[in-house]
Image: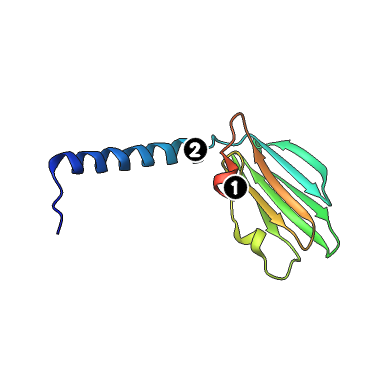
Amino acid sequence: MMMLRAGDVGVLLAGAGLVAALTVFAWGGGRGDTAVIRASGQVVQTTALTHTQSFTVDGPLGTTRIEIEPGRARIARDPSPRQLCVKQGWLTQSGQAALCLPNQVSLEIRGRTSAYDTLGY
């Protein structure tokens, strides 16, 4: 049975600290300031996240309702069968997106900095 020495513990703690710092740095996108709404791959609306507003977007299955409040946006209602984009809830960080694939509607938050998305996908 191997015993850990003080130097081993120090290396493990330093490695864990480095991993935690890199995780925060890599996934830490800034606050979003713009919402981009797409339907069938085309940008329908680009709006700032500064005041309360609501949009409806038509897709192949029906109408999707998008709500925007200061600093956040969400898909409030969608005719897709599993409601995955509605269950995403409020999006606030740059790089976040809600995709209603059956209805071909998407909502993306953009900002000055974006999170490193390939780590999340």
Q: Residue furthest bottom?
A: 81
Which color scheme is applied? rainbow
Quadrant in the rendering for residue 76: bottom right
At 67% from the left and 45% from the top, the residue drawn is 68
Judge depth for marks 2 and 1 and give the one in front: 2
The Cα–Cα distance between marks 2 and 1, rounded to whole angstroms, is: 18 Å
**CB atoms at circles 2 and 1 under 8 Å apart?**
no
Neighbourhood count class around disc 2 (C-alpha, 10 Å): few under 14, some 14–19, many 20 upward? some
Q: Residue at x 66, y 59 (%)?
A: 85
Q: Secondary structure at mark 1?
A: loop
Left or right of 25: which side holds 82? right
Left or right of 5? Residue 59 is right
Query: Which is nearer the eye, 26 or 1?
Result: 1
Vertical arrangement, residue 113 with respect to residue 66, above or below: above
Residue denoted by label 2 = 26
Q: Nearer the viewer, residue 109 or 69?
A: 109
Give amino acid for label 1: Leu
The residue wearing badge 1 is 91
Give whichever of discs 2 and 1 has the lower sequence position: 2
Kindly identify the amino acid type of the residue bearing the numbered disc 2.
Ala
In the rendered image, residue 29, in percent from the top left (x then y), is placed at 54, 37
Quadrant (top left/top right/bottom left/bottom right) for the N terminus? bottom left
Residue drawn at point x = 72 percent, y = 71 percent: 81
User: Where is residue 120 drawn, in percent x and y?
Assistant: 56, 49
Q: Quadrant of residue 96?
A: top right
- In this picture, residue 81 sits left or right of residue 59: left
- Residue 65 in the image: state x and y as whole percent: 74, 55
